[in-house]
């Protein structure tokens, strides 16, 4: 391998190497190579970033000399001069990691200005007001990013200056006021740092580069990486891009904007985006002013629009992917400042995938791999019931930013949204705009509504990524954050008032509008059918009711991998009977009550087996400890009530120190065999019943918490007895598979023995993870897992994605030993990992027969299964 250099000019970098250059740097160098108009500049690599940290946060010695060499290069190309009093070269210093992390790291604009160059810049632009304004913006950004000065301090000075001069708009400030502001701004910085504000561009540049590197480990960025599972092998450090400044704020023939080459929202093949005349880039991105639709540009600046469209086509063709671009027009001259693969809403991913295959831009494999599997879930979410909409009053309209509808109570405060959302309330978060630090409030909210910003604003992009419905730029909404209320069209909405947002149309309604389940589009079906054909691994559902089973089947599940029988006992009318059973004083009494339960279970099984006709339904017998069904014995309220005395006594008797490793699953069945006997009977009865009406029911019985073949054999005997009894009763043979979960460490290690009895296995990866780590999930997640992740001890929660080297290895042992006995043994996995794309990829490579996931995650699992096949194929090819 060629040793990489610390610094690359855009035209000399290998733009394929995103890990080294970061996405922004790679995009800039690629556009430069494609002869698109990019201002000259260079990239300092991510390797330097890592060295910077290894070096105790000091730039390696060779970096600044190379940087200065490249600055000279830029001088040559632009004809401008670094630190010149006549024609100064100004630059932006921009962060950019291998994966785009919008708004998470820092960028500094207008660097190179000082008391002298600002005069040169005034001459160069023939506009002193403009150059002093640029200078004051620079000091503000530099102060904030490099020194960590609070923005508010600068804002106060700005407000005071406007008052003093008697103007309302920033743009009306005159040179005198601006000079004053500059000197005040510097004082703020100097007070903060206790040193003189750096005037030499070289020093400014060095400090700015370091600040960008530092922002990689900034809190925002670290949290974002954790939430988006961006690990070191995906993005390791940020690069720094130094780019010649161009100005979209040099008058009415200047503009700046962002554009998607196709609609990021529904995938239509038309430019989508917005721009502002006489503005700088960050104004559009931050949504400070709501921009004009990109089609307007066609009329307003036709020549630039033409260049933009041409660039869009060229880049899409080159990257074979929808692009998200930033452009700036400086006095009629068009520049590109960034391009990256666009983050799209689920609907847009699906449509553009199908379209681009039709256009022969990509093949089906690429069409499948470019869709983030977890996003498909968004397409299964609710939309407004249009037939009921007349009864509701429309409150306002904004820009549709992320599809799907949501209703809930209005909350204007980020902290409150988190509080209420986590307490189970349905929350619609309403803000003027959102910032990265607001992201934690997105998770527990149903939807997001902002009064400012466009389709590419922070709120829109983040919501899309999470599959939450979102409306932005709802300008008629006047938000009064102080008093927790908002007003539009003469109506006031206060905190906790119900509202409904439709992120597909931008409509906001008063009240809770009924929502309906989505229809699957033709393109969605097309994608799923391609994925279905490609994938190898089976996909089944975790479903406990006929409704969920039907839903899962509709979404493409071929069977049920986990039907939790205890969920059926938890229903209102049943829990009472179940408790009676636990409280029974004699075996005789218990058996009598079990007969009642048996009837109920039988009808449950009939429903679910029918809904999954023709496919296997894995029925897991009772799993939790019995005391889980009884009241909390230490509940002081209940203790006062005499009626509860016996219940509580029994609960105390059954209570355990560590119930998850206690008397549960097969262990309960060994002390109370009558319970499993009842459940097994119910399965046979249901099957016999359905056979009469020619329903092809395929139940299989699964025993939880098994750790030894002796335990399993013990239950197998009961099964055999019931089977004999049933075959006599119904005068027919039954073929109902008997299998076990592998969720106890010992079971995995002795799976060869278990395979003598079991006809199938299913990994319970939740319990297995708890066992392998000796982590009690609930305790760990609340207490220290977060810290582990902050410290990098654990990169992704093992409860979210299978821990391959620990749990995964144990699974491989379980599979290998089991299949040594039975070559074609069916081995699946159930539990939340079954719907996690990374875990599915692992399962595919470990030859797991199927994954089982919640109904809403079935399309995700199917697509992830296909992606696993394609990835393996591609890896083989590249070998
Ligand atoms: P982010 O990664 O947050 O998008 P960027 O580095 O792209 O940050 O920069 C923030 C804003 O500044 C963008 O709107 C970008 O277009 C603008 N910008 C960056 N560099 C320049 C430049 N050299 N000239 C003009 N505008 C710039
Ligand atoms: Mg950008
Ligand atoms: Mg379990």
Image: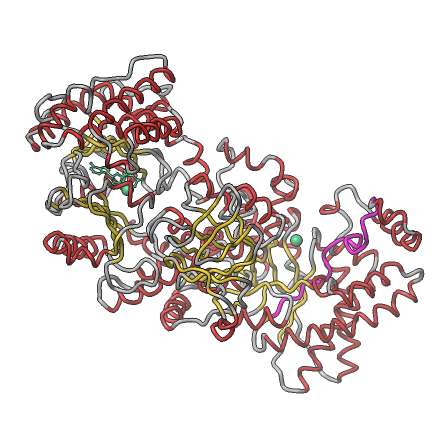
For this view, does 864 lie left or right of residue 732? left
The residue under the point 36% across, 12% down is 194
Q: Is residue 51 visible?
A: no
* Residue 738, quarter of picture: bottom right
Rendering coords of residue 243 (x, y %): 19, 34
Residue 378 at x, y = what percent? 45, 60
Q: Is residue 408 above or below residue 357?
A: above
Q: Which residues are magenta?
A: 617-634
Q: Position of residue 60 (x, y in %)?
A: 28, 20
Q: Tell me: 549 left or right of 622.
A: left
Residue drawn at x 84%, y 49% as measured from the top left: 654
Query: Ligand 1 is located in which of the four quadrants?
Result: top left
Instruction: Give the residue at x 31% y 44%.
Output: 285
Q: Nearer the viewer, residue 54 or 182?
A: 182
Q: Viewer-proximal residue, 368 or 120?
A: 120
Quarter-of-image position of residue 197: top left
């Amino acid at each position: 391998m060629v040793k990489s250099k610390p610094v690359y000019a855009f035209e000399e970098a290998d733009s394929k190497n995103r890990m080294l250059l970061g996405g922004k740097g790679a995009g800039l160098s690629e556009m430069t190579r494609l002869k698109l108009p990019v201002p000259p500049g260079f990239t300092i690599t991510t390797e330097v970033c890592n060295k910077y940290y290894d070096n105790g946060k000091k730039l390696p010695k060779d970096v600044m000399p190379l940087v200065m060499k490249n600055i000279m290069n830029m001088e040559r190309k632009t004809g401008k001069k670094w630190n010149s009093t006549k024609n100064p070269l100004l630059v932006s210093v921009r962060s950019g990691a291998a994966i785009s992390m919008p708004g998470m790291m820092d960028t500094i604009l207008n660097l190179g200005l000082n008391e002298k160059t600002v005069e040169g810049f005034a001459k160069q632009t023939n506009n002193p007001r403009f150059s002093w304004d640029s200078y004051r913006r620079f000091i503000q950004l530099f102060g904030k990013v490099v020194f960590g000065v609070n923005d508010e301090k600068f804002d106060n000075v700005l407000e005071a200056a406007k008052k003093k001069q008697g103007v309302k708009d920033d743009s009306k400030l005159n040179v005198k006021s601006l000079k004053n502001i500059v000197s005040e701004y510097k004082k703020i910085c100097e007070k903060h740092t206790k040193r003189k504000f750096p005037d030499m561009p070289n020093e400014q540049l060095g400090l700015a580069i370091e600040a960008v590197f530092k922002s990689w480990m900034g809190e925002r960025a670290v949290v974002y990486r954790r939430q988006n599972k961006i690990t070191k092998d995906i993005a390791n450090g940020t690069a720094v891009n130094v780019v010649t400044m161009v100005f979209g704020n040099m008058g009415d023939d200047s503009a700046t904007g962002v554009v998607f080459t196709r609609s990021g929202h529904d995938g239509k093949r038309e430019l989508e985006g917005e721009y502002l005349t006489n503005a700088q880039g960050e104004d559009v991105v931050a949504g400070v002013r709501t921009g004009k639709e990109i089609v307007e540009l066609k009329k307003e600046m036709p020549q630039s629009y033409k260049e933009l469209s041409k660039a869009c086509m060229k880049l899409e063709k080159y990257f074979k992917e929808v692009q998200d671009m930033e452009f700036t027009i400086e006095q009629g001259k068009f520049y590109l400042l960034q391009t990256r693969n666009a983050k799209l809403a689920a609907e847009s991913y699906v449509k553009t995938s199908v379209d681009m295959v039709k256009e022969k831009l990509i093949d089906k494999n690429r069409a499948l791999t470019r869709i983030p599997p977890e996003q498909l879930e968004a397409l299964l979410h609710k939309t407004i019931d249009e037939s009921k909409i007349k009864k509701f009053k429309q409150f306002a309209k904004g820009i549709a930013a992320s599809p799907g509808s949501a209703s809930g109570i209005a909350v204007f405060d980020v902290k409150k949204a988190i509080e209420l959302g986590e307490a189970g309330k349905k929350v619609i978060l309403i803000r003027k705009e959102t910032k990265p630090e607001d992201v934690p409030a997105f998770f527990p909210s149903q939807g997001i509504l902002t009064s400012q910003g466009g389709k590419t604003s922070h709120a829109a992009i983040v919501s899309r990524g999470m599959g939450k419905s979102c409306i932005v730029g709802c300008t008629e909404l006047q938000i009064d954050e102080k008093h927790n209320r908002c007003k539009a069209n003469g109506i006031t909405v206060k905190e906790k008032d119900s509202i409904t947002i439709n992120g597909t149309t931008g409509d906001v309604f008063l009240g809770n509008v009924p929502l309906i389940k989505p229809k699957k589009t033709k393109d969605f079906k097309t994608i799923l059918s391609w994925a279905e054909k490609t994938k190898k691994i089976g996909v089944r559902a975790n479903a406990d009711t006929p409704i969920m089973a039907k839903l899962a089947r509709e979404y493409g599940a071929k069977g049920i991998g986990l039907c939790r029988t205890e969920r059926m006992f938890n229903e209102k009318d049943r829990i009472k009977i179940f408790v009676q059973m636990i409280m029974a004083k004699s075996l005789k009494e218990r058996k009598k009550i079990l007969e009642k339960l048996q009837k109920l279970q039988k009808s449950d099984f009939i429903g679910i087996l029918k809904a999954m006709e023709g496919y296997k339904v894995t029925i897991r017998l009772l799993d939790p400890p019995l005391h889980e069904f009884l009241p909390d014995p230490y509940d002081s309220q209940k203790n006062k009530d005499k009626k509860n005395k016996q219940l509580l006594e029994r609960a105390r008797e059954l209570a355990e120190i560590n119930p998850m490793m206690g008397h549960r699953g097969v262990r309960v069945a060994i002390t109370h065999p009558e319970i499993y006997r009842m459940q097994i009977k119910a399965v046979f009865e249901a099957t016999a019943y359905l056979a009469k009406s020619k329903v092809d029911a395929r139940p299989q019985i699964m025993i939880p918490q098994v750790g030894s073949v002796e335990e399993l054999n013990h239950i197998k005997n009961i099964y055999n007895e019931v089977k004999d009894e049933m075959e006599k009763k119904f005068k027919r043979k039954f073929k109902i598979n008997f299998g076990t979960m592998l969720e106890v460490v010992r079971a995995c290690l002795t799976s060869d023995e278990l395979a003598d009895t079991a006809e199938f296995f299913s990994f319970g990866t939740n319990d297995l993870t708890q066992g392998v780590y000796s982590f009690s999930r609930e305790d760990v997640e609340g207490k220290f897992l977060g810290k582990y992740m902050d410290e990098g001890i654990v990169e992704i929660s093992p409860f979210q994605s299978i821990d391959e080297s620990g749990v995964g290895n144990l699974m491989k042992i379980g599979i290998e030993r089991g299949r040594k006995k039975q070559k074609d043994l069916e081995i699946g996995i159930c539990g939340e990992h079954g719907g996690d794309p990374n875990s599915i990829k692992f399962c595919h490579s470990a030859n797991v027969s199927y994954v089982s996931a919640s109904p809403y995650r079935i399309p995700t699992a199917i697509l992830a299964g296909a992606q696993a096949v394609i990835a393996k194929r591609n890896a083989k090819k590249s070998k």
